[in-house]
Image: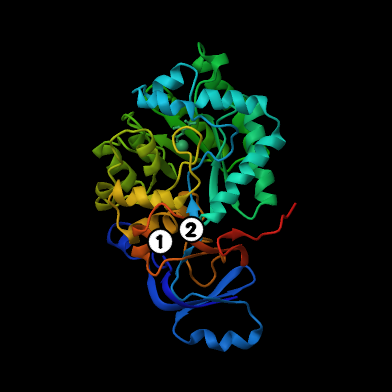
Amino acid sequence: MIIKNISCLVTCAGNCPKIKENLKDAGIVDDGYVIVDKDKIVEVGSGDGYKKYLDCNRLVIDGRGKTVTPGLVDSHTHVVYVGSREKELSLKLKNVKYIDILKAGGGILSTVNSVRKTPIEKIENETKDRLDRMLLHGTTTVESKSGYGLDFENEMKMLQVNKNLNKKHPMDIVSTYLGAHAIPEEFKDNREGYIDFMINSVIPYVREHNMAEFIDCFCEKGVYTAREARKILEAGKKAGLKAKIHADEVESASAAELAGEIRAVSAEHLVSASDEGIKSLADNKVVAVLLPTTSFYLMLNKFAPAKKMIEEGVIVALATDCNPGTSPTESLQATMTFACFGLKMLPEEIINAMTINGAAAISRESQIGSIEAGKKADITVFNAKSLDYLIYHFGVNAVDTVVKNGEIVVKNGKLVYTNIV
Ligand code: NIG
Ligand code: FE
């Protein structure tokens, strides 16, 4: 495959992950081209260099008027679920707080009820539709958490959906066990009991049966304390899972500090991270995954201190947090908008944060996240004459073409992949 005469080729190549000034360099090439052989990128250049490949019977895509980026990496999602929670919107408009909805058995726990009642096939179908929408919006790799089952059977059901769809769907799915997403109703008066159950029964099974690569915990006032999160994540790490943490989403629980101390791969949300927390992330090279659509949707009137994090040398990534409660969107283009207007990040910083730095948040930076020879041929072609234009024109889907593993899966904005079943 040849993608030629690209008006704005955004390679996100070079040193990785990208921090500080380097985050402002998106490796932009004017009049660029990309050569793909099977599922790999083999050459990247500018001008006429592609012409030597023209006689090889290759598929040619014309990049005139287009912006081409690495396939987008959505490094924090809860994409496996059933149902929807639009009723919570009017509660929020009446100023009922997210944590209070959860305490009253709504929020996460209402999706837990839906997931427990629903057979795996139906959950898989609903999730497949969401993965299709992600692909249509330019995403080619997604991290996907459990956490709406909480008991053994239903957590495994969710992780099995990740496994099944990773095989059947073009999207690459990186799986995370998030049993510590809430305290299930049946353990309401026995939190210790639930934590011990996760540590003694679930984590060993997850590891032994390769159900997940990461472990996560919702460390927040009213959910899991920093002490509990440390215990759960340390146990996960001991078993061979890599740690992520939902940290300081609404209020500070010193979770960013903890992320650094336990050398988590990533800490997510961080809206209320303290200055010490930010320093701990930078010192320990923990990727900060920021989720600006969630701040917007929770009506927090507050966004994560992205500028400060970047200045302090934190590795910043961006993701959708796709979930039925606090961010019902599959679109990383929505994240671009809120990263610009809420986090005040520059277009170059935004695109690096949802490609190469997103890849780092899921330990995939050597395979994906940039357009460089040797990387996987995951490429998104936008109907936008420049990167600035892509961020500027908001609220519409700019995707023209998506190449996944060297195959065209979206063409003229429509899905064209054939089921792998
Ligand atoms: O990232 N914070 C916890 N988990 C999700 C919300 C999930 C839900 O409300 O269903 C989040 O915001
Ligand atoms: Fe989340």
Q: Are marks 1 and 2 in contact (CB under 8 Å)?
A: yes
Q: Which mark is residue 242?
A: none
Residue 163 in picture, x, y percent from top left: 66, 44
Query: Residues under labels 1 and 2: Cα distance?
Result: 8 Å
Front residue of 120/382: it is: 382
Does any portion of residue 205 appear in the rendered image? no
Q: Local crowd at mark 2 within 10 Å, few (<14), some, or many (≥20)?
A: some
Residue to which mark 1 is pinned: 16
- Compared to residue 317, the image places residue 261 above or below, namely above
Identify the residue at horizontal 44%, vertical 78% (top origin): 32
68 is higher (above) or lower (below) than 59: above
What is the x, y in percent for residue 144?
55, 42
Q: Tell me which numbered mark, 1 or 2, is placed earlier along the sequence.
A: 1
Q: Residue at x 44, y 54 (%)?
A: 396
Residue 315 coordinates in the image, percent (x, y): 36, 52
Is the CB–ligand 2 distance for label 1 below 8 Å?
A: no
Q: Amino acid at mark 2?
A: Glu
Residue at far right of view: 421
Asked whether, in this view, residue 106 is left or right of residue 94, the answer is right
Based on the displayed image, in which of its 4 quarters is residue 356 positioned? bottom left
Q: Nearer the viewer, residue 52 or 398?
A: 398
| Secondary structure category for the residue under label 1 | loop
Mark 1, residues whose alpha carbon is within 10 Å: few (<14), some, or many (≥20)? some
What kind of residue is marked 1? Answer: Cys
Q: Which structural element holds mark 2?
A: loop
**Which residue position holds label 2?**
365
**Residue 196 % position (x, y):** 55, 21
Which quarter of the image is occupied by the N terminus?
bottom right
By what rule are the colours in the image chosen?
Answer: rainbow
Q: How many marks?
A: 2
